[in-house]
Image (cartoon, rainbow, N blue to C red):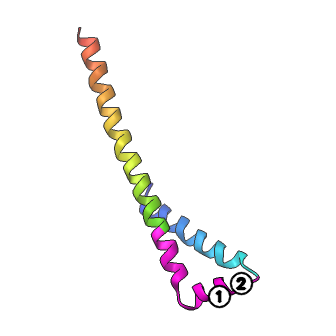
Amino acid sequence: MSSKKIALILALTVAGARAGATTVSPLEGAFFESAKIYVVVAVAVLILGGIFAYLIALERKLKKLENEVNQRNTAK
């Protein structure tokens, strides 16, 4: 996935979260006033991004191993 798509998804997620919140609880207000909500969102995005990057790398390694096994089986 390109970085432009990721940035767009992140922007839409944050914009949607802010637009959908019509009533603000005291806890939400505290998070927005101190800008901690952005830290929470950034940490969540980093964790999910790391998980997706790990899964993509794992898939590539698995595909490489599958190709090696297939080549060995056809060579026999």
Q: Position of residue 35 (x, y in %)?
A: 52, 86
Q: Where is residue 3 in the image (x, y as percent from the top left)?
A: 42, 63
Q: Which mark is residue 16?
A: none
Say which of 8 and 35 sits in front. Answer: 35
Q: Does the magenta stretch include residue 13?
A: no
Say which of 13 and 54 sits in front. Answer: 54
Q: Which mark is residue 25?
A: 2
Q: Which residue is drawn at 23% across and 8% down?
A: 76
Q: In the image, what residue type sits under mark 2?
A: Ser
In the image, which residues are magenta? 23-43
Q: Element under label 2? A: loop
Q: How many marks?
A: 2
CA distance separating discs 1 and 2 = 6 Å
Q: Element under label 1? A: helix
Count residues near mark 1 (Cα–Cα under 10 Å), then give few for <14, some for 14-19, many for 20+: few
Q: To which quarter of the image does residue 28 belong?
A: bottom right
Left/right of residue 23 with respect to residue 31 in the rendered view: right
Q: Name the residue under label 1.
A: 29
Left/right of residue 53 with respect to residue 21 in the rendered view: left
Circle 1/circle 2 CB separation < 8 Å: yes
